[in-house]
Structure formats: structure tokens, C-alpha cells
Amino acid sequence: MLDQNLSKIKYASQLAKKRGWRWVAVSAIGELPYIPGLVGRLANSMCAQTPGFLVALAGVRANQLWADRKQVMERVAREFLTKPSNVLEVGTWMGKGSTQVWIQLLPARSSLTVLDLWKQYVASNEQIGATARMDSMHHVAINSTLRSIYRAESEGRLAISLIRADSKSFLPLLNDNSFDLIYLDGSHYYADVKADLQQAKRLIRDGGLICGDDLDLAPTPELIELARTRTDQDFVLLDDGRAFHPGVMLATVEELKSVQCENASGGIAMIADCNH
């Protein structure tokens, strides 16, 4: 025991020379009983447990899963996810919206992959109050998603993967025919939506479903032509008070053979492309 203690002292002395006494002190604290574990849990809670009312007071919606949207998503999930399935979600934000639908309704032994960049997603010249506030809370959003995943994994039903990456870089790395349902709610810019849809068609299995958010208005020839002139814009407000995401509309009609838009006023589209 004496030799072992001497070895530890020598090791600590070497660490102090290489990395400083602060490193040694932290290492010593880590050897104490109980205290490090308690402090670790407290630190994790303080960093991750952002109260919901603070998010609301910042003028940010934690999710947009309103009742009418939720009903559509739940119906589609129950129809298409009847056996262990693989689901991909592009665009997760705080993990409190569509992510919760998949977590709650996916059958046991299913897998869920959630992908988000958790960075500024609207160009600086298009920033308005709401998007600017959201862009200031990415650390809150990713921590919120992690809490949801840890909670769901503790039930032992699902295998859940969280990926922080640009979809244009990450999706091409995945194998063909990997998913039974793909939900797209990432960047709204035309080039990004088009790339996501092209990858989704490659990644979806026969009989699967590609679905997504923010096809706000049913496509018409007039709106499609307008969208072609606004491919560098996230959001367009029309003179009659309606609004839409031109990139989502244009990429959708170009890439998918059939589109079923439900609850368009709420901004959700369940997009079927089973004959890709």
C-alpha cells in the first residue's frame, strides 16, 4: 500500500509539472466518495434544465405541434409505423414537436435518427425578431432534445441517434433504402430542400413515406412561377396576407410525383412519393 501511495504521489508530481496543479486538484477531487457524483449531477442539471417559462419569455416557441397538426402526424404515424421501423427526422430543434410523435408512436425495437445543425438557419438579411431569438437559443434547443432522447431511451423501447450536422453533408453518407418514414423540416431554402428531397428519395424504402413541414399553400402555377424568382428567400408574404416558403414549394413540385397537403393553413404537408 505504501508503494502504491508513493507511486500516486510521483504520478501527481509529474502531472503537476506537465499540466499544472489545477489538473491535480481536479483529479484528487474525482477520487473522493459521493461528492463528485453529486456535483456532476448538479452541474449537468444546471446546464441542461432550462425552464420552459424562460424560453417563452424570450419570445420563442418550443415547438409548433398544435392540436390540428398533431392529429395529422399521429394518424400518419399509426398508418405507416405498424411494425418495428426506421425513421429519419431532418430538423428537430428542441425535440418537443414532431420528435415526440415518433418517440411515442414508434413500435418497440424501432430506430429513430434525428438530425439538426443547431445553428443559424435563416440568412442574416432575412432575420426577423422570431428567427433571431431562435438563433440565440441553439444551446437550449440541443440540450432539450438530448433530455428527450435520454428519457425515451430509459424506457428501452427505441434506439435513438442524434446527429449534429448539415443534412447536405450527412445524408449522402447513409445507405440506400434505409428508412420507412422520413420527415423533412430543415432549411427552407430551395437548394437545401431540393437536396434533402433527392436524398430522401434514395433513402426511403419501397412503400415508405416521405413527409414534412412548411408547404404552406397548395401549389398553383402562379405561386410556382413566383417561387422560381424567390429561390434565395426563406419566406414570402403575399399582398393578400397569405405567406409561404418558396423553396419548399418549388423543390417539392420538382422532386415529387404526388403531393398530399393536409392542414395547409397550419403549414404541414404529408408528402407521399412511393413511386420514386
Image: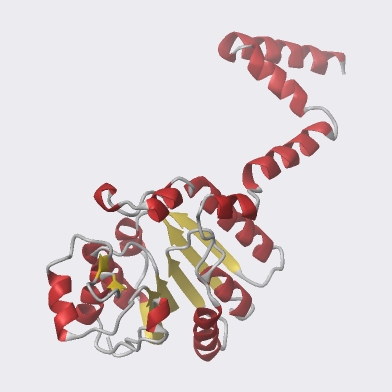
Placement of 191 over or under 123, stated as above or below: below
Residue in the image at 28% along x and 64% along y:
235
Tell me the quarter of the picture where residue 6 sits.
top right
Whole-percent x, y for residue 153 in the image? 66, 64
Residue at figure coordinates x 44%, y 61% from the top left? 115
Residue positioned 60% across, 72% down in the render: 103
Q: Quadrant of residue 176?
A: bottom left
Q: Nearer the viewer, residue 212 or 36?
A: 212
Q: Quadrant of the N terminus?
A: top right
Counting labels gives 0
**Residue under the image location 22 percent in, 61 percent down:** 233
Residue 81 drawn at (x, y percent): 53, 85
- Residue 110's place in the image compared with 20, above or below, is below
Taking the image as shown, residue 96 lies to the left or right of residue 46, namely left
Expressed as whole percent of the image width and height from the top left, the position of residue 149 reads: 61, 61
* Residue 148 quadrant: bottom right
In depth, the one of 93 and 39 nearer the eye is 93
